[in-house]
Amino acid sequence: MRIKDLRADERPREKLLARGAGSLSNGELLAVLLRSGNPRCSVLELSRQLLDLSDGRLGALFNLPRERMLSLPGIGAGKAASVLAAFELGRRFLMEESSVVKRPLLTAQGVHELMLPQLKGLQHEECWVLFLNMHRYLIGKMRVSSGGSNSTTFDIRQIIRAALDKGATALILVHNHPTGNPTPGPSDIRRTEELRRGVAALGLELTDHVVVADDSCYSFADNRMYPLQK
């Protein structure tokens, strides 16, 4: 069905303006971004085809290669750019909302909630360090590496320099597992101990290493992983 054949209050753009973005389905929101279809299908049908490429999942659409998106008839560079920009704006919004923590970071779940907007949906590993003051309030965070699909590394000296520059007294190491299984591997355990020893030599404390998956996390501190166990 063509957009002009719909009632005015059922057309995606008009519906959004009248009822709010929350009233639209994922396909309708995509239709607003795409603006128009192609000679053989309406923009709503084109939106459904784009969602079909990702099994209807926004997380999969976020990671859809742009070449795959561009292969869909009716999706040119402009439409693909609009979709990619929308995802990036959403990610930055969540990061901005999470950048100010008004309570101490005392639990792995709090770390998971803080970092999930930056790590959710990634298909490669990233490693971050959270810098805390003596009251365990967040005073800064830094991405220290971005690796391949199953590994990541970090420079201990870089982390120590940043911690001293920020006046931090404690750190939390965070990295993601794109596989969805947050259980740490042997290299995760080894590198965590190397970092713990490195920062301890300068009077800093590594309070936890939280491994993040989209819907779960693993805390070295909560699981009393040797040698972080006190």
Image (cartoon, grey):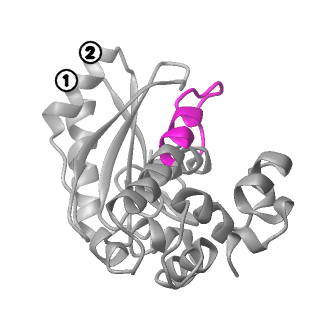
Image location of residue 145, percent across then percent down: 22, 48
Residue 105 belongs to magenta span: yes
Residue 106 - label? none
Q: Is residue 157 left or right of residue 125?
A: left
Residue 221 appears in the picture as rendered: no
Q: CA distance from mark 1 to mark 2?
A: 6 Å
Quadrant of the rendering where the C terminus is positioned = top left
| Circles 1 and 2: CB atoms closer than 8 Å | yes
Q: Which residue is mark 2?
A: 165
Amino acid type for the residue under numbered disc 1: Arg
Q: Judge the density around disc 1: few (<14), some (14-19), many (≥20) Cα neighbours within 10 Å.
A: few
Residue range (magenta): 91-107
Image location of residue 19, percent across then percent down: 85, 50
Q: Judge the density around disc 2: few (<14), some (14-19), many (≥20) Cα neighbours within 10 Å.
A: few
Q: Which residue is mark 1?
A: 161
Say if 65 sits above or below 205 in the image: below
- SS at mark 2 in the image: helix
- SS at mark 1 in the image: helix
Residue 90 appears in the picture as rendered: yes
Residue 79 belongs to magenta span: no
Say if 206 sits above or below 112 in the image: above
Quadrant of the rendering where the N terminus is positioned = bottom right
Amino acid type for the residue under numbered disc 2: Asp
Give the quadrant of residue 205. Answer: top left
| x 49%, y 80%: residue | 39
Viewer-nearest residue: 81 or 136: 81
Viewer-nearest residue: 190 or 65: 65
